[in-house]
Image (cartoon, rainbow, N blue to C red):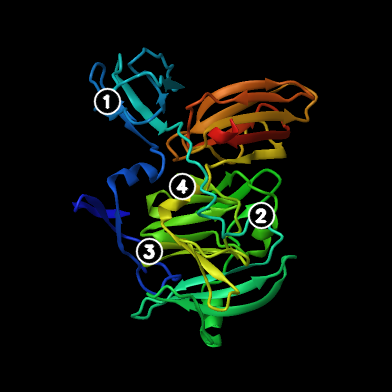
Amino acid sequence: MVVDFTDWNGNLVMAADDASVMQNPFLGRSQSNLWFGKFEDLSEMGKPAGWGGVWKEESIKAGVPSEPFMCCGFDRRVLHLSRIWEEYTVISVQAHGYKYFLISENLDAYWIRLTLDRDADVVSAYFHYSNSECTPYDEKAFKSIAHVDTKKEYSRGIIYPKDDKAMTLGFAAEFIDSSGNTVGSGYYEIGAEMILKRVHNPSLEKEICSKLKITKDYEVDAASVIMYDEEGNRYRLPKGSDIFNNISANGSCRCIREVVTERFLMNVHGSFYELPRESAGGLAKIKPISTHNLMISDFASWRGMLVLAGIVNEAAQDEHYICSDDHKTGLWFGNVDDLWEMGNPRGEGGPCFKTPLLANKPSDPYLMTGYAHKSVSLIHDSKDDVEFTIEVDYLANNTWHIYDKIIVKPGEKAMHSFPIGFNAHWVRVAVDKDCKATAWFVYRDEQQR
């Protein structure tokens, strides 16, 4: 959260608003700092992406243009239309209907606006923008963090920015052997001198482990990761490595924690997501940041830095990794924007896998936004043809529109690749007759194309 910025001696300075103690029991005191860099660093802070529109379920008069909507700086642009139509090319949309339109990468325009040919009610026109540029994985920056399939000794634990005036960071560590067994523990602290020291304070160590206990915040089934919002609505997310299934069951990796004021970072099945507070949309408005498949047990903001736990024992100290004074553990320090360099979002799964579905009753929502190359395979166990209806929610507010209908013959698999540049926030499927159905989505990044 950049609250201010300025040019200082030819450099860029940003004032951050990192983790706050507001409704945040995992923090002893608020954490923030100044960021110093160069203007060209802005281009390395993540790929431009976003969504928004000119109308959202509004009454629109014929011939009255919309306000302009920004159109430049994004390679891939899709316009979702419900009810009537859009200009740049004329697209007819039937009453109560839906269409999407992929804007050509060759369109060189700064702004785009829309006009209807007749009066209409409940009109929506919504854009989803992304970029084709692939952010390379920075293997050097994260080499000290244990991979999910590691057979090496490593440490994990709980991070706690304390409430003392010295702004000390506490770390309750566990030591894991090459077989994955816990073989010891210890308590450590680090301060302004950036030396991670072992400290004998068993009562504080116990308090941290109890107060900040890592909980099981998501479920996993054969189809996908399952999460619930505060109202009990169920959402499904792609899966990473199957090894994370056991990690989810034993609660050894933290899922949700605030690292930027009024935003949460969510670490689920090997991927990081940005999770807004419930008042700002909550789980329905999440977006993927990166897929890392690393054994990150905890993460936190401290003195304006992002801190990660989950370090392999044989790691060499570098610009990100600080080893403890007893050489039994360590922590990773960096910037929250470094997460963009952990690997582009990817994964597999779906809203159903050999799941009994009732005719015309939609599946759970499955995340779609933020992934580069998207395809789905459809299978069923019926002896008759089954029509699968694919619906998308581009507003992320449980408003659904039919994307396509695909007939799948008995014993066959139907494959569909979504057009390059197509994006919506959520996707779901329905079938026209009772059966056990599978809709398996594969999300790849540019490098896996």
Q: Residue at x 69, y 24 (%)?
A: 414
Badge 4 amino acid: Trp
**Marks 2/3: CA–CA distance:** 27 Å
Q: Amino acid at mark 3?
A: Ala
Q: Which secondary structure, mark 1?
A: strand
Q: Does residue 246 lie above or below 421 as drawn?
A: below
* Residue 13 image point, x, y percent: 25, 54
Residue at the location (58% across, 45% down)? 237
Pointer 3: what residue? Answer: 19
- Residue 35 visible in the picture: yes
* Whether label 3 touches label 4, CB < 8 Å: no
Marks 1 and 3: CB-CB under 8 Å?
no
Structural crowding at the residue carrying mark 3, measured as other residues with C-alpha within 10 Å and reported as few (<14), some (14–19) or many (≥20) = many
Q: Quadrant of the N terminus?
A: bottom left
Q: Is residue 321 left or right of residue 30?
A: right
From the top left corner, tell me how far across and down residue 300 is, in percent: 46, 64
For the residues labelled 1 and 3, the Cα–Cα distance comes to: 36 Å
Return the x and y of residue 445 as percentages of the image width and height: 55, 36
Q: Is residue 248 above or below residue 85?
A: below
Closest to the observer: 147 or 235? Answer: 147
Q: Which mark is residue 340?
A: 4
Q: Residues within 10 Å of mark 1 (few under 14, many from 20)?
A: few
SS state under label 2 = helix
Q: Quadrant of residue 163?
A: bottom left
